Image (cartoon, coloured by chain):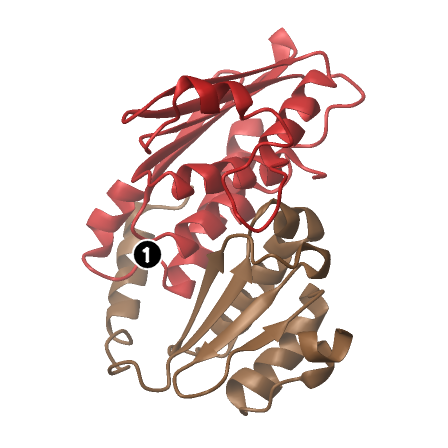
Chain colours: A red, B brown
């Protein structure tokens, strides 16, 4: 993975597999503290203690097609490579929260990349799931909540290509806005 | 900043076009593999390219969605095209620049691009 946004896309796939109906993605670029933190919180089925212990093991996976599960280990490695940290908390029947902390100016810190492509894709491919995307940059932030969007859409499918392209633009504009 | 009014206007515009499709006939589903292998191999820009082509051509009967690990990780990005009454077509080693041709020849004109399919690689 070359971008943090791709690691996020991958992590959220796990939340979707876990049956989550509400997934929160929070990105906090705290430049003055030299940290970029990503947290993905879901209300999926969660993991028991054994699974939680094994989730960062590349040879642990719940899929049947292959013997490796590399997504979480890769994300952990990406964060720790910069001198940062990685945490997962989970409770069976409640959900899971994953946090990856990157040291912002470390040479090995991969770019955040295109969050509009990641969030846009998630909304388009999972219309039955609600996403709350929050992006903080220093002291500016914005939130995109699909529950609010769906209210305004009054039944128009959120996965309609024109709506998806519109939402991607909203994210791009807001991203530029908070960084200016 | 994009405004609420813009979203409302988009909603009203789309409301006019949604519902023209009836039933499952003629519906085409484009399914892009989005497991770790797919994402690492470049599936996200492939899906984005399909979305843009479909929007460009206003193909209301086509839906783009994702799937998990298909089991042929070395051939990722993988794209399956599902159409009622027709055999599933599996495209492998997909890139964004192959998308326009597939939409034009296969999705619109009904002729799968065999050179991009799994049958041609194996």
- Note whether residue A180 is visible: no
x 36%, y 28%: residue: A46
Q: Is residue A117 above or below residue A53?
A: below
Q: Quick one: A44 or B28, which is closer to the camera?
A: A44
| Quarter of the figure with the C terminus of chain B | bottom right
x 32%, y 86%: residue: B25
Q: Is residue A49 above or below residue B82?
A: above
Chain letter, disc 1 residue: A
Give the image quarter of residue B49. Answer: bottom right
Report crowding for label 1: few under 14, some 14 to 19, many 20 or more residues within 10 A (C-alpha): many
| Quarter of the figure with the N terminus of chain B | top left
**Residue at the top extreme, as displayed:** A33
Q: Secondary structure at mark 1?
A: loop
* Side of B122 relative to B103 (left or right): right
Q: Is residue B80 above or below residue B26?
A: above
In this figure, which residue is indicated by the disc labeled 1? A158
x 72%, y 11%: residue: A83
* Side of A19 relative to B46 (left or right): left
Q: Quick one: B120 or B19, which is closer to the camera?
A: B120
Q: Is residue B80 above or below residue B22?
A: above
Position of residue A170 measured from the top left corner of the image (x, y, whole percent) = 45, 46
């Amino acid at each position: 993975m070359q971008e943090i946004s791709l690691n996020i896309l991958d992590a959220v796939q796990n939340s979707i597999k876990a049956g989550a109906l509400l997934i929160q993605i929070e990105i906090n670029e705290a430049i003055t503290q030299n940290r970029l933190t990503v947290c993905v919180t879901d209300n999926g089925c969660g993991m028991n203690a054994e699974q939680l212990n094994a989730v960062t093991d590349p040879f642990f996976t719940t899929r049947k097609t292959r013997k490796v599960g590399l997504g979480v280990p890769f994300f952990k490695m990406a964060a720790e490579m910069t001198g940062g940290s990685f945490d997962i908390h989970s409770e069976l029947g409640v959900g899971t929260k994953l946090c990856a902390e990157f040291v912002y100016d470390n040479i090995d810190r991969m770019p955040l990349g295109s969050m509009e492509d990641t969030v846009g894709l998630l909304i388009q491919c999972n219309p039955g799931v609600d996403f709350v995307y929050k992006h903080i940059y220093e002291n500016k932030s914005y939130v995109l909540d699909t529950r609010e969007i769906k209210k305004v859409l009054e039944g128009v499918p959120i996965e309609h290509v024109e709506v998806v392209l519109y939402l991607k633009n909203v994210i791009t504009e807001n991203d530029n806005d908070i960084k200016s | 900043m994009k405004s609420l009014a813009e979203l409302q206007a988009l909603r009203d515009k789309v409301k006019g076009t949604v519902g023209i499709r009836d039933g499952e006939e003629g519906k085409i589903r484009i399914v892009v593999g989005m497991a770790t292998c797919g994402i690492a191999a470049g599936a996200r820009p492939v899906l984005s390219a399909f979305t843009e082509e479909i929007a460009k051509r206003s193909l209301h009967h086509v839906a783009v969605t994702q799937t998990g690990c298909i089991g042929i990780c070395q051939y990722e990005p993988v794209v399956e095209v599902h159409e009622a009454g027709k055999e599933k077509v599996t495209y492998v080693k997909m890139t964004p620049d192959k998308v326009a041709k597939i939409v034009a020849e296969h999705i619109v004109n009904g002729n799968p691009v065999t050179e991009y399919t799994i049958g041609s690689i194996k």
